[in-house]
Image (cartoon, rainbow, N blue to C red):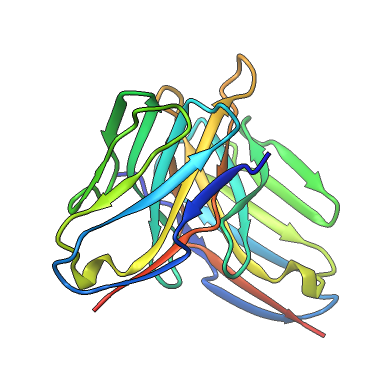
């Protein structure tokens, strides 16, 4: 199993450009998440999905969009990139382990994005 | 909005020393997880604590969940250079699609 994969690893965007960050998982997890991590900080939830066709906003959704057409893929779209979106972006997935709600999240290696 | 504050933010110690990292909130969580993140990688789960007062040990690491399920601590005994990394606590509430609220992080550096 590859786990959670993210592409690209690094990207530099000019202000106003758009791009899509790709995320895929091969663990058949229903739940998927996008986080951003600013330098020296914890992670903030951007969007999440509880299954194909279902997405919802997290703590910091402005400037981003997501879609979930399959269980495996959860791309994050940045429209009109701004310097404030310079960050490291992590995708994660999880699945209920037992009837008791112990959800472990598995993270991808991250995409480092710079907007100049 | 639920917040998790970690202290200290940064810790630099020598090999063999002991340390404790704290994770505090004014909110109650149904469970709390601790992750470690190394440079250039995503966080990796270390442990999940669920019951108030619960203590879990992972080799030289001891995790405790507060009685009121609002706080947690991570104690490392005889730290080693391999313990270097960013430690993140994350709280979860039942019925929230297992969304995590992450703490602010504690960066640990262990030198020889």
In front: B25, or A110?
A: A110
Q: Is residue A90 above or below residue A26?
A: below
A106 left or right of B63 in image: left
Residue at 80% x, 46% y: name it.
B57
Q: Is residue B99 above or below residue B11?
A: above
Q: Image quarter for residue B106?
A: bottom right
Q: Is residue B70 visible?
A: no
Q: Is residue A45 visible?
A: yes
Seen as rendered, the residue at the extreme bottom is B112
Residue at 36% x, 37% y: name it.
A48
Residue A54, percent from left and from top:
31, 25
Report the label total.
0
In front: A39, or A16?
A: A16
Seen as rendered, the residue at the extreme top is A99
In front: B93, or B7?
A: B93
Q: Is residue B11 above or below residue A22?
A: below
Residue A21, percent from left and from top:
36, 53
Residue A73, percent from left and from top:
43, 36
Q: Is residue B94 above or below residue A63?
A: above
Residue at 56% x, 75% y: name it.
B10
A82 left or right of A26 in image: left
Indicate the quadrant containing the N terminus of chain A: top left, top right, bottom left or bottom right.
top right
Residue at 51% x, 71% y: name it.
B9
Residue B87, percent from left and from top:
60, 61
Q: Image quarter for residue A43?
A: bottom left
């Amino acid at each position: 199993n590859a786990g959670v994969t993210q592409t690209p690893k690094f990207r530099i965007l000019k202000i106003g450009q758009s791009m899509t960050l790709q995320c895929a998982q091969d663990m058949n997890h229903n739940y998927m998440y996008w986080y951003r991590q600013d330098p020296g900080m914890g992670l903030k939830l951007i969007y999440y999905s509880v299954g194909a066709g279902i997405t919802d906003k997290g703590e910091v959704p402005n400037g981003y969009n997501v879609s979930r057409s399959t269980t495996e893929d959860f791309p994050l779209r940045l429209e009109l990139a701004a310097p404030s979106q310079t960050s490291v972006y992590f995708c994660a997935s999880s699945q209920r382990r037992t009837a008791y709600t112990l959800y472990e999240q598995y993270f991808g290696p991250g995409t480092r994005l710079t907007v100049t | 909005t639920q917040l998790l504050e970690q202290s200290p933010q940064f810790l630099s110690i020598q090999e063999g020393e002991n340390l404790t990292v704290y994770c505090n909130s004014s909110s109650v969580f149904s469970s709390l997880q601790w992750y470690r993140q190394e440079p250039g990688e995503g966080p990796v789960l270390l442990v999940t604590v669920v019951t108030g007062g619960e203590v879990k040990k992972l080799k030289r690491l001891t995790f405790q969940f507060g009685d009121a399920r609002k706080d947690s601590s991570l104690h490392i005994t005889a730290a080693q250079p391999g313990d270097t990394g960013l430690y993140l606590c994350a709280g979860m509430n039942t019925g929230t699609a297992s969304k995590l609220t992450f703490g602010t992080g504690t960066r640990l550096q262990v030198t020889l």
